Image (spheres, rainbow, N blue to C red):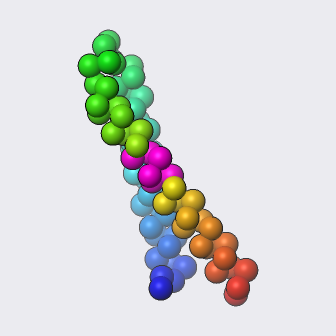
Amino acid sequence: MYDVDELLEAKRQIDSTLHKIREVVKTFEAKENPSRYKSQLTLAKRRLKAFGIANQLIEDKLVEMENNG
């Protein structure tokens, strides 16, 4: 389906996006009234979870491909 290079690039892109979303969460939480940004925080945290799952699935597939040579 996908080769190792494609999976590694997808993982790199997801890692970059995760970093950016974590920074967004920090920014919103550091604001004077973070409850004002509740919906944005909820969305960002859900995205962190979803991208984290995707990243783990890619890692699992890479390990599987490595073991099957």
Coordinates of residue 69 in the picture (x, y in percent): 70, 87
- 39 vs 30: above or below: below
Query: What residue is rendered at 70% in x and 85% in y?
Result: 68
Q: Is residue 26 magenta?
A: no
Q: Main secondary structure of the magenta part?
A: helix
Q: Is residue 48 magenta?
A: yes
Hey, which quadrant is residue 38 in on the image?
top left
The residue located at (64%, 80%) in the rendering is 65
Image-based side of 32 in relation to 62, left or right: left
Taking the view exactly as shown, the residue that stands out farthest to the top is 32
- The residue stretch that appears in magenta: 47-52
Residue shown at 55%/79% (left/top)?
4
Residue 57, compared with residue 48, is above or below; it is below
> Residue pushed farthest right?
67
In the drawing, does residue 64 fall left or right of residue 23?
Answer: right
Vertically, is 33 above or below 40?
Answer: above
Give how far across and how far down residue 66 sits, in percent: 68, 79
Please tell me how many numbered marks the rendered image carries.
0
As drawn, is 8 to the left or to the right of 24? right
- The x, y position of residue 56, in whole percent, is 57, 59
Residue at horizontal 29%, vertical 33%? 40
Quadrant housing residue 27: top left
Q: Quadrant of residue 31?
A: top left
